[in-house]
Amino acid sequence: MASLFVAQLLHLVAPFIFELKNQSLCKALSIVTHFAFLAAFFWMNVMSFDICFIFSTGFTNSGERGSPSKRVLFYRFYAWLGAVIIVGSAASVEYTSDSSFKPGYGDGVCWISNSRGLMVFFLVPIAILLFSNSVFFLISAVSIHMSSKKTSRILKRKNTCKLLIYTKLSVVMGLTWCFGFSAAATNSQALWYLFIFFNTLQGFFIATFFLCTKKVFQIVRDGASSFYSNTRSLTVKKSLTSKSGNEKGRNASRKFEARY
């Protein structure tokens, strides 16, 4: 997820930008970071809905209920526009109003410095998205359980634990951010550690879950085998061509010697 990568990268760069004492640059960085984080959460919400849609309706029915390209277009419109509306509203309050909910971009830190502005323009939207993600997660988990139960009954196989699937879903849906809200509410140090650990490595977990699969490994293995076989056949062909050329040269030399 590009937006999550940009958000976390800018969050790391922010202290160095603040040291430059360039408030305009710091404000611009704060707004872009704000937008990147919100876009990441909106995209996680999109993925949560799409996963829920697929598992709750079934793979066949989900394909019949609308073109995938139209769904992707709607997802893009929803994710980017949602982030633009919230950040645009925050920026308009920042530059055109003296409201107590003014974000305070770049005032003392290259981020939202006003706690009320942070609450209204960042924490509340994220809380709403996380709540909807939790609902989508529960629906998906129930659908997976019912589908697995039905399949195991038909195939007469033992219903295996789906803990890994549920863990993947929770990370992709951004539910690890619930540790942050719980830590803030309870002031528990253990929850803060869990929040920092899971969200620092969230991009790594998502990339691992999407890339480290049997299907991807099979594609890489097939590609490597194809590359090796093509390289080997090319080497053999060059070797045969070289041998053929040498043989022709020797035959020509023998004919020349026999003639003279």
Image (cartoon, rainbow, N blue to C red):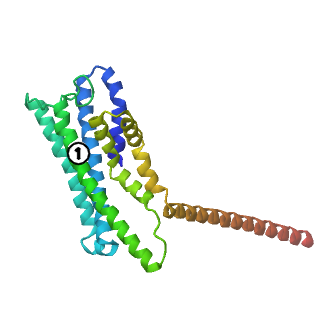
Residue depicted at x 36% and y 30%: 13
Residue depicted at x 45% and y 69%: 159
Depth check, front residue: 184 or 10: 184
Residue depicted at x 43% and y 51%: 207
Label 1: which secondary element: helix
Depth check, front residue: 101 or 28: 101
Task: Say left or right for 69 vs 240.
Answer: left
Structural crowding at the residue carrying mark 1, measured as other residues with C-alpha within 10 Å and reported as few (<14), some (14–19) or many (≥20): some
Query: Looking at the image, how many numbered discs can be counted on the residues?
Result: 1
Above or below for 21 versus 73: above
Q: Is the C terminus in the top left, top right, bottom left or bottom right quadrant?
A: bottom right
Depth check, front residue: 4 or 195: 195
Residue 130 in view, yes or no: yes
Above or below for 57 versus 75: below
Above or below for 107 versus 148: above
Task: Say left or right for 164 vs 110.
Answer: right
Q: Amino acid at mark 1?
A: Ala
Task: Say left or right for 111 vs 238.
Answer: left
**Image x and y of residue 25, in percent:** 26, 27
Residue 4, quarter of the rendered image: top left
Depth check, front residue: 76 or 129: 129
Residue 99, quarter of the rendered image: top left
Q: Residue furthest bottom?
A: 154
Residue depicted at x 25% and y 32%: 30
**Image x and y of residue 191, in percent:** 36, 38
The residue that label 1 is drawn on is: 127
Residue 260 in view, yes or no: no
**Image x and y of residue 49, in percent:** 27, 59
**Image x and y of residue 80, in percent:** 23, 50
